[in-house]
C-alpha cells in the first residue's frame, strides 16, 4: 500500500470524531419525550374534553383565548384532540413495534442460530410478507378482521385492537429480517463456539451471547419502525378505515379533510404532529445507529 | 448454462412467493364473517348468489377455491367485480388503471432522479462542506415526512388556497397533454420528495466511496475538468445502488400509490386495490394483490441479474 | 542542460484526528530536462506523498508549503485550475496498482483517448489512430481489439502497459512513476521498467521513479533521493551513491533487496524496528532506534543535511566510510 492511501484512510474519521453539538438529537428527544408524556399523562391536564363539541365556537382559528389551537368545524377543541390523539397514535405504534419486534426478533434470531429447514421456511415467509406492501397488508387485515356493516357495527376498541394486530403483523418480517441478518454475523463467532464447546445449552447461548449483540441493531431500526407505523395509522385513517371519530391524529386529519377549504388548520395541525413525530423517531433512530456504529468500530 | 440455471431458480422463487402470498390471502378471506359470495354482491337475489358461489369455487372448500382462482389466473382469466353497476372484468380494470399508475410512478422517478443525481454527486464531492450539510439535513427531514401529510398540505396550499391547479382529477395525455401534466404535478411531487431524498443519500454514500478510488485520482491526473471527472469516471461506477433502488421502486411504489391516488382521485391501480379491499371483492382483491406481489418480486430478481450486466466488476467476481 | 523541476523546502502535513501528521519535511530537489530521479524508501517514508504533492494531487486535508518551480514557472502559487492545465500534457503519473487505477466500468479505448480528445482536441478518428499507435508503442498485441475491452479482461502487466500508454499519450515532459512495478509479477517487472526507460529516451522525458526497491532504481535513474520518515536522508548521483554510500539507512535498504542467489527458504534481512510516529516531534535522528551504529549524540540531536562533495548529500553524524 502506498503512503498516501495510508494517510488518506484515517481522514474520514475526522468528521465523526469532531465533537459537534447534536442539536437534532436534543430536539428529537425532547419532542418524543413530550409526545409520550402527553400520551400517558395527557388526561390529567386541564384541557377541554376532546369528544364534546363547543357549539358556540365552530371552526375557530388557532391562537384564540379559549381554544389555543382553534376548533374543528364541528366545534371540537384541536388541542384536546391532539393530546388525546397522541394516546392512540403512539400507543398503537409502540405496541405494534414492541410485540411485533419481539416476535420478529425471536423468530429471526432462532432461525439464524438453528439454520436448516426452519430457517428456510422462516426466510420464505418473511419474503412472502414483505412482497405485499405494508399498507395493502394492513388494509386487507383490517377489512377482514374489523369487518362491519349496518347489522353488526364494530366498536372503536375492537378497531383499535385489530389495528394493533395488523401493525404487529406488518412489523414482524421487517425486524425479523434485521434480527436474522445481525444474528447470522454473531452465531459463527468464536465466543459462541467456545460457549457451545463448554456444553452451554442453545437457549442460554441465544439469550446470553447473541441477543445482547443483536439488540442494538433492533433498537435502532425499532425507532424507524415506530415512525413508519405512525404513518401507516395515518394512511389508514385517511383511507377511512382506521380509528373512527377523531380519536387518533390520523383520524383527526381524515375528519378535517372535509373542512379543508375554510379551516385548513384542521388538516395541517394533525399532519404536523404526525410529521414531527415521525421525523423525530427517524432522527433519534439515526443517532442510536451512529452511536452504535462508533462502538462497533472501536472493537 | 449458468445464466439459465440462475434465471430458472429466480422464476421458481417468484412463483413460490406469489403462490404462498395469495394462498394466505384466500385463507384470510375464509375468515370473513358472513358469506363471501353474499358480500360480493349484497343486493343480488338468492339464486344469483348461488351461481356466484359456484362460479368462483366457494363451494369447494378453501383449497378448491384457491385452486380454482389460481388456474383461472394462469389461463388469463383474472376474475370479475360483482358490485357497482353490473359485473366488470378485473383484466379490463387492470388494463385501464395500470398505465395511469405507471405514468405517475415514471414521472416521479424522472423528477427525483434528475434532482438526486446532481445533488448526490455535488454533495459527495463537497463532503462535509456547508452545502453538503444543508442538503443532507434537509433530505433526511424530507425522507421522514409522511407522504400523505405532504400530499394533503400541498393540495391545501397550491390547490385550495392559491388555486394554481385543480385539487383532484386526472386527464389522459392523449386528451389534453397540458392539462394532464398540470394535474400530475401535485401527486408526482408528493411521491418524488421521498424518492429524491433516498436516492440522493444512496448516491452520495457511493460517490464518497468511489472518490477514494485510485482510478479517480488517475483520471484527475490527466488534467481534465472536475465536472468531467465526476460525470465520466465517478458517476457510472457509483450508480449501481441508485439504479437498483429505482428499479425496485417500480414494483414497490404500486403499493405506495394507494394513498396518493385516493387523495388526488386518480383512477390508478392503487385506488382499485383500495376499492376492491374496501368493498370486499375477494376475487379482484386477490388478483390485484397477486399482481403487486409479482411486480415486487419480479423487479427484485431482475435487478439482481441486471446489475451483473450493468457493472462489469460483478462479472469479474463471478469468473 | 536546463532545469525542469525545482522543489525548494517543500513540507507536507495532513490534519488527522490524532494531530498533525508530517509526511514530508523540508525537501529540496532539482531535476534537469530528460533526467531521471529515483525516490527510495520504506512504505511510510513519505515518498508517494512527495510525488503527489509535487504534482498537486493531494486531498483537501493536506497542507503544502515551499516552492515548486516547473519550467521556470512557480507552480506552487498557481490556482488549481492553472495547475490542472499542466497535468497530462506537462506532468503525468503512472500509478502503483494497475488493478485499481483503471476505471472498471469504462472501455480501454475510452480511457486511452480521453486525454487525446479533451486535452489535445483531436477528433475521434485521429484519437483512435493515435491510441492504436500508443498501444503498439507499449507492445500490446492486436491493439484494435484491445480498445474494446474492459480492464477486468486483462492481466496486471497488460493493465500497467495501458496505464503507461495513457500517461505518455500527451507527451509530457515529466513522468511520475509511483511504484510502477510493485503490483506485478517479477518476470513482468523488468519488461515494464525497460519499456518506461525506452519511451523516456525516445522523447527526452524526465522521470521521478518512486520505489521501495533500491535494485529497481539502480539501472533506470541518474540520481537518487533516499527518504526516511519524511526527510531526504541521502541524495546523490546514482553511481556515486552505490560506490560511496554514506547513510546506515541506505545500507540497510540495500541489504533488504531479495537476490536470485539468496537460497530459497532463508529469511530476508529486514530492517529491525519501526518508523517513528509521524504525529510526534521527537528529538534526535529519526533512525536512531533502528541504527546499528547509534550513539548518544544521535538520540539527542537531529543531524543536518551535509554536503560530501560531488553533489552528494547525507544526513548523519557518523556516515559510513569515516570522516567525522
Image (cartoon, coloured by chain):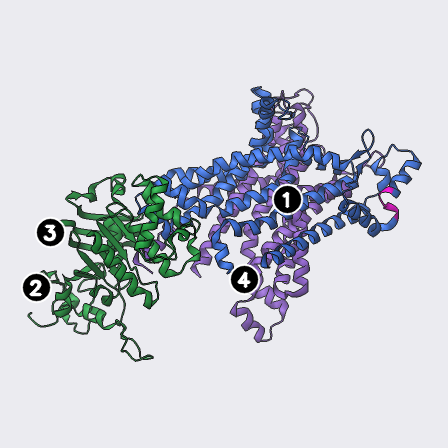
Q: Is residue A118 left or right of residue C53?
A: right
Badge 3 marks a residue whose secondary structure is loop
Q: Which one is in front, A254 or A173? A: A173
Per the image, the residue denoted by label 1 is: A93
Circle 4 chain: A
- Marks 2 and 3, the one that precedes in the sequence: 3
In space, the residues marked 4 and 1 are separated at their CA atoms by 29 Å
Judged by its main secondary structure, the magenta piece is helix
Per the image, the residue denoted by label 2 is: C308
Q: Is residue C200 left or right of residue C318?
A: right
Q: Which one is in front, B4 or A28? A: B4
In space, the residues marked 2 and 3 are separated at their CA atoms by 23 Å
Circle 2 chain: C
Q: Is residue B272 above or below residue C258?
A: above
Q: Residues within 10 Å of mark 2 (few under 14, many from 20)?
A: few
Range shown magenta: B55-59
> Mark 2, mark 4: which one is toward the viewer?
2
Per the image, the residue denoted by label 4 is: A185
Amino acid at each position: 500500500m502506498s503512503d498516501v492511501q495510508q494517510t488518506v484512510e484515517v481522514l474520514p474519521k475526522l468528521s465523526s470524531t469532531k465533537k459537534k453539538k447534536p442539536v437534532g438529537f436534543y430536539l428529537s428527544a425532547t419532542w418524543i419525550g413530550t409526545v409520550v408524556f402527553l400520551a400517558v399523562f395527557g388526561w390529567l391536564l386541564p384541557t377541554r374534553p376532546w369528544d364534546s363539541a363547543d357549539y358556540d365556537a365552530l371552526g375557530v382559528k388557532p391562537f384564540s383565548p379559549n381554544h389555543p389551537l382553534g376548533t374543528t368545524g364541528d366545534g371540537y377543541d384541536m388541542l384536546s384532540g391532539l393530546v388525546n390523539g397522541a394516546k392512540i397514535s403512539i400507543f398503537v405504534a409502540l405496541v405494534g413495534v414492541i410485540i411485533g419486534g419481539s416476535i420478529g426478533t425471536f423468530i429471526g434470531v432462532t432461525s439464524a442460530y438453528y439454520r436448516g429447514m426452519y430457517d428456510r421456511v422462516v426466510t420464505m415467509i418473511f419474503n412472502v410478507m414483505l412482497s405485499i406492501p405494508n399498507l395493502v397488508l394492513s388494509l386487507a387485515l383490517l377489512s377482514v378482521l374489523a369487518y362491519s356493516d349496518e347489522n353488526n357495527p364494530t366498536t372503536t376498541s375492537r378497531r383499535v385492537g385489530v389495528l394493533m394486530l395488523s401493525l404487529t403483523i406488518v412489523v414482524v418480517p421487517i425486524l425479523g429480517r434485521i434480527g436474522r441478518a445481525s444474528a447470522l454475523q454473531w452465531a459463527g463467532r468464536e465466543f459462541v463456539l467456545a460457549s457451545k464447546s463448554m456444553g452451554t445449552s442453545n437457549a442460554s447461548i441465544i439469550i446470553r451471547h447473541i441477543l445482547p449483540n443483536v439488540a442494538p441493531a433492533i433498537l435502532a431500526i425499532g425507532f424507524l419502525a415506530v415512525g413508519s407505523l405512525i404513518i401507516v395509522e395515518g394512511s389508514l385513517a385517511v383511507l377511512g378505515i382506521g380509528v373512527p371519530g377523531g380519536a387518533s391524529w390520523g383520524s383527526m386529519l381524515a375528519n378535517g379533510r372535509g373542512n379543508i377549504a375554510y379551516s385548513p388548520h384542521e388538516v395541517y395541525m394533525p399532519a404536523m404532529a404526525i410529521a414531527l413525530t415521525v421525523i423525530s423517531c427517524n432522527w433519534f433512530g439515526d443517532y442510536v445507529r451512529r452511536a452504535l456504529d462508533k462502538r462497533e468500530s472501536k472493537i | 448454462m449458468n445464466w439459465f440455471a440462475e434465471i430458472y431458480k429466480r422464476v421458481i422463487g417468484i412463483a413460490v412467493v406469489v403462490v404462498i402470498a395469495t394462498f394466505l390471502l384466500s385463507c384470510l378471506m375464509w375468515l370473513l364473517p358472513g358469506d363471501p359470495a353474499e358480500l360480493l354482491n349484497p343486493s343480488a337475489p338468492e339464486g344469483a348468489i348461488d351461481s356466484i358461489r359456484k362460479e368462483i369455487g366457494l363451494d369447494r372448500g378453501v383449497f378448491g377455491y384457491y385452486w380454482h382462482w389460481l388456474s383461472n389466473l394462469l389461463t388469463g382469466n383474472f376474475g370479475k367485480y360483482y358490485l357497482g353497476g353490473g359485473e366488470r372484468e378485473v383484466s379490463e380494470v387492470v388494463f385501464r388503471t395500470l398505465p395511469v399508475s405507471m405514468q405517475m410512478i415514471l414521472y416521479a422517478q424522472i423528477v427525483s432522479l434528475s434532482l438526486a443525481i446532481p445533488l448526490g454527486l455535488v454533495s459527495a464531492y463537497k463532503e462535509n462542506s456547508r452545502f453538503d450539510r444543508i442538503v443532507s439535513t434537509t433530505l433526511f427531514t424530507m425522507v421522514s415526512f409522511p407522504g400523505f401529510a405532504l400530499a394533503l398540505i400541498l393540495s391545501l396550499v397550491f390547490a385550495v388556497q392559491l388555486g394554481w391547479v385543480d385539487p383532484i382529477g386526472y386527464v389522459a395525455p392523449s386528451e389534453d397533454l397540458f392539462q394532464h401534466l398540470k394535474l400530475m404535478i401535485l401527486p408526482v411531487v408528493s411521491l418524488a420528495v421521498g424518492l429524491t431524498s433516498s436516492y440522493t443519500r444512496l448516491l452520495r454514500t457511493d460517490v464518497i466511496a468511489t472518490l477514494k478510488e485510485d482510478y479517480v485520482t488517475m483520471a484527475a491526473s490527466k488534467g481534465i475538468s472536475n465536472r468531467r471527472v465526476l460525470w465520466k469516471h465517478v458517476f457510472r461506477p457509483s450508480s449501481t445502488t441508485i439504479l437498483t433502488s429505482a428499479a425496485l421502486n417500480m414494483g414497490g411504489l404500486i403499493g405506495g400509490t394507494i394513498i396518493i391516488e385516493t387523495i388526488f382521485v386518480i383512477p390508478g391501480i392503487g385506488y382499485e386495490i383500495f376499492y376492491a379491499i374496501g368493498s370486499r371483492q375477494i376475487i379482484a382483491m386477490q388478483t390485484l394483490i397477486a399482481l403487486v406481489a409479482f411486480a415486487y418480486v419480479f423487479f427484485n430478481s431482475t435487478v439482481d441479474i441486471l446489475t451483473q450486466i450493468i457493472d462489469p466488476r460483478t462479472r469479474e467476481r463471478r469468473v | 542542460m536546463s532545469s525542469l523541476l525545482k522543489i525548494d523546502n517543500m513540507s507536507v502535513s495532513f490534519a488527522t484526528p490524532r494531530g498533525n501528521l508530517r509526511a514530508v519535511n523540508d525537501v529540496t530537489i532539482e531535476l534537469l530536462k530528460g533526467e531521471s530521479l529515483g525516490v527510495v524508501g520504506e512504505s511510510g517514508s513519505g515518498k508517494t506523498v512527495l510525488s503527489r504533492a509535487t504534482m498537486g494531487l493531494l486531498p483537501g486535508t493536506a497542507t503544502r508549503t515551499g516552492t515548486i518551480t516547473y519550467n521556470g514557472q512557480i507552480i506552487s502559487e498557481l490556482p488549481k485550475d492553472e495547475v490542472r492545465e499542466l497535468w497530462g500534457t506537462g506532468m503525468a503519473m503512472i500509478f502503483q496498482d494497475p488493478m485499481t487505477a483503471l476505471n472498471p466500468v469504462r472501455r480501454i479505448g475510452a480511457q486511452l483517448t480521453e486525454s487525446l480528445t479533451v486535452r489535445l482536441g483531436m477528433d475521434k478518428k485521429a484519437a483512435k489512430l493515435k491510441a492504436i499507435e500508443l498501444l503498439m508503442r507499449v507492445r500490446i498485441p492486436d491493439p484494435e481489439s484491445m480498445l474494446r475491452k474492459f480492464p477486468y479482461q486483462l492481466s496486471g502487466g497488460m493493465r500497467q502497459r495501458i496505464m503507461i500508454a495513457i500517461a505518455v499519450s500527451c507527451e509530457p515532459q515529466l513522468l511520475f512513476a509511483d511504484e510502477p512495478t510493485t503490483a506485478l509479477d517479477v518476470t513482468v517487472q523488468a519488461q515494464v521498467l525497460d519499456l518506461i526507460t525506452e519511451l523516456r529516451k525516445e522523447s527526452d522525458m524526465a522521470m521521478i521513479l518512486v520505489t521501495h526497491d533500491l535494485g529497481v532504481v539502480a539501472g533506470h535513474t541518474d540520481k537518487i533521493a533516499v527518504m526516511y520518515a519524511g526527510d531526504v536522508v541521502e541524495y546523490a548521483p546514482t553511481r556515486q551513491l552505490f560506490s560511496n554510500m554514506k547513510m546506515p539507512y541506505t545500507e540497510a535498504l540495500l541489504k533488504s533487496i531479495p537476490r536470485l542467489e539468496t537460497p530459497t527458504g532463508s529469511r530476508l534481512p529486514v530492517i529491525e524496528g519501526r518508523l517513528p510516529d509521524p504525529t510526534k516531534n521527537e528529538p534526535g535522528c529519526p533512525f536512531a532506534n533502528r541504527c546499528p551504529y547509534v550513539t548518544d549524540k544521535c538520540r539527542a540531536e537531529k543531524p543536518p543535511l551535509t554536503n560530501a562533495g560531488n553533489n552528494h548529500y547525507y544526513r548523519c553524524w557518523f556516515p559510513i566510510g569515516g570522516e567525522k
